[in-house]
Amino acid sequence: MTIGLIAHAGKEGARELVEKITSELDRRKAPFLMERQTATLVGKISPLDESGVAEQCDLMIVMGGDGSILRALHRSGGTIRPILGINIGSLGFLTCLGSEEYQRAVDSALSGNYLLSQRSLLDVAISGPEGVVPLERALNEVTISRGERSQLVKLLASVEGDPLTEYHADGLIVATPTGSTAYSLAAGGPILMPDSGALVITPVCPHVLSNRSLVISDKREVVIGSVGAQEVFVSVDGRPPHALSPSQHVRMKLSPMSLPLVMMPDTSFPDILRQKLKWSGSNV
């Protein structure tokens, strides 16, 4: 078992955490690799970027927050490895342990004492008269928005070839169950269980009050285009946007690949919700 280490170098406490984990792995004589910026945190040199680490390891320990996991996934190219996330921060729906639990993280990674939550991904492409341009796979969401302009945009959405409605809004979010606790939740969308087999379409500040979030099967392809001559922008998991011309559409469908996200055996998704959202009540 070779462990790949990737840390958010800008996070306070990242250097100390990398030092502790590498010392623990050395003590156990366990082989590991480090991404180049992670290595510099502890005075080491590595030639590997995220894709190089992913290609050569069996499991990646990602230290940071949910954004760090998203970056590690997107920068790993076509190689998807199980990811064990260690949180350095305050929220972190995708991380399974806090930085103070680094020894447990190493124990679990080396012993295999963990569960894998298979998180669905979306294959995303822009199609138009010029052809089809594949974009990044989405773990969280695809956002179609107005960019820096102040006016609302008109977006026409269809599901599996059937027209759904025309949205007049700041934008539109198509989220996976994983992404339902991210931007979609902030825009008023529902929380989906990771294994729900669904997608959620959430308008951002819709002009029509009856435009609410819609939950659909993840077996259906979602196609969205702009209405009229306006240009809109497509962003995958918050990455730099792609311009979408009036003659183009963004197409989203379930990917045959998924992300194996490491979860602790004694922690369920409802446990994570209660902890992260600070839910309380007489029975919890």
Image (spheres, helix red, strand yellow):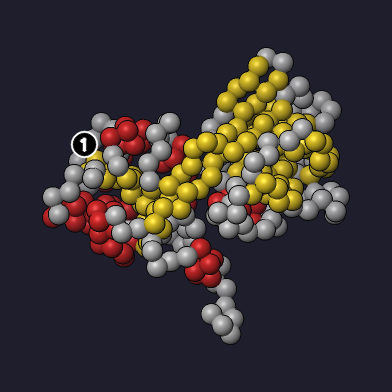
Q: Which residue is mark 1?
A: 45
Q: Residue at x 53, y 80 (%)?
A: 284
Q: Nearer the viewer, residue 37 or 180?
A: 180
Give the structural element (helix, strand or loop) at label 1: loop
Q: Residue at x 42, y 31 (%)?
A: 77
**Side (left or right) of 160 relative to 111:** right
Kind of residue sitting beneath label 1 = Ile
**Neighbourhood count class around disc 1 (C-alpha, 10 Å): few under 14, some 14–19, many 20 upward:** some
| Rendered image quadrant of residue 239 | top right
Q: Nearer the viewer, residue 115 or 129?
A: 115
Q: Residue at x 31, y 64 (%)?
A: 101
Residue 61 at what x, y percent from top left? 33, 49
Vertical relation: 280 (above or below) 121: below
**Side (left or right) of 247 relative to 82:** right
Q: Nearer the viewer, residue 190 or 242?
A: 190
Q: Is residue 83 visible?
A: yes
| Rendered image quadrant of residue 21 | bottom left
